[in-house]
Image (cartoon, grey):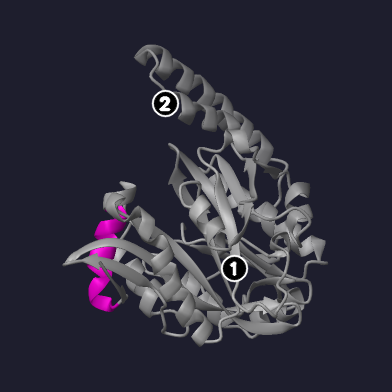
Amino acid sequence: MMIFKVEENNISDICKLFEDVNKYPLSKCNSKEKAKWLYFQNNSGKNYSRIMLKEKSMLAHWGAIPLKFKRCDKIIKGSTSFQLTCRKEALGSTLFLWREIEKELIDEGVVANYNFHNESSHPALVSMGWETECVPILLTPLRPLQLLSDIISSKNLNRVLKYLLMIVFCKIDFCLYKLANLFVKDCNNIKEVNDFDDGDYDQIWNEMSKSVDSGIVLNSEYMKWRYIEKPNNSYKILSYIESGKVKGYLVYAITEEFKTSIGVVMDIVADCNNAKVIKSLIRTAKRKTCQKGATIMTALSFKGNIFYQHFTDSWFFNVPKKLLPQQSYFAVKDLNKTDGGIPINRWHVSWGCHDKW
């Protein structure tokens, strides 16, 4: 078995490996285009990803790309790793893949790497020195009776009973939704935009970054790559504009998961002390996703982080571990042993940090 750095001509085999192992595609739209964007069209144009081949067969893959991190008062070289995928005959090979990636990261002066992973990968990553923490998933119900109807529709119930229950719940839910909207007014300051070209966007990040201990640099360059240049993107950007100036913005998406429609808060960039702006953005995102059929909305935030209180004030709650289909983890590995690092629960994380959506 041989380990190689990922090249563009490996994209098709990486997508096939991912789908063979996980039983679902890398992307719901175009897996090859997503992989090409991720590996070869990121801001630096570099990738640290590795594959393992036996003769001409791909047995394993571990993706990694560079990112800029904000740590305390410094901008440092960082990276994220993702899509650790192995066929059964290569399950013990992850250490060798990581050693190759880690060597290049250190040679390039990269200070830290983060990833998200599931329970099956967790023991291996802990043994390789990652600090890990359960992913802090937050949820808020938008249309609970419609959600219940969606759950019932996926259950093996009597066909007539299932149909009647779905009709009843949908009718009640629709009436409650209409009633609730009678008392909710649109915020005139919030507009939907299509880009991050206004210079205000970098200024907002500069203000927000003063309260961020550690996390991705959410400047306009990164946000354009993450949300505008991504192939087949379906993100919506809400900007809070006051006196002609952008005061904050929120990126959200709507996806189909677990037989229902889910709204996803991808990222918020705003001065964390400006509660009016942040809560208005969250409230508007909830209403817009609800109008488009979402039954619940999700966000990520460690307890005590800059937007956590704003989410809980907006009726988001932590999902108990017992209710999750499987436990997911956020992991950080400090590559510069003299740097000291930041406690993992002080990282600013969001669904935008994740490669899932």
Please state if 197 lies on the left or on the right of 95 as rendered: right
Q: Residues within 10 Å of mark 1 (few under 14, many from 20)?
A: many
Residue 139: percent from left, percent from top: 63, 44
Q: Quadrant of the N terminus?
A: bottom left
What predominant SS class does the magenta segment belong to?
helix
Span of residues in magenta: 7-19
Three-letter amino acid code at disc 2? Ser
**Residue in front for this viewpoint, 178 or 248:** 248
Q: CA distance from mark 2 to mark 1?
A: 43 Å
Which picture quadrant has residue 100? Answer: bottom left
The number of discs equals 2
Where's residue 262, x and y in %? Answer: 51, 45
Q: Residue at x 61, y 51 (%)?
A: 135
Say if 150 sits above or below 22 in the image: above
Is residue 176 shown in magenta?
no
Q: Residue at x 54, y 57 (%)?
A: 127
Name which of mark 2 and mark 1 comes first in the sequence.
2
Q: Position of residue 96 (x, y in %)?
A: 39, 67
Query: Which of the two marks, 2 or 1, is nearer to us in this view?
Result: 1
Q: Which residue is mark 2?
A: 153
Q: Which residue is mark 1?
A: 333
Residue 27 in sight from this viewpoint: no
Above-or-below relation of 284 to 209:
above
Residue 341 in the image, given as x and y percentages of width and height: 70, 72
Q: At label 1, which amino acid type do we have?
A: Lys
The correct choice, above or below, for 27 with respect to 112 in the image is: above
Q: Residue at x 72, y 69 (%)?
A: 342
Task: Decide if residue 44 is on the left or right side of residue 184.
Answer: left
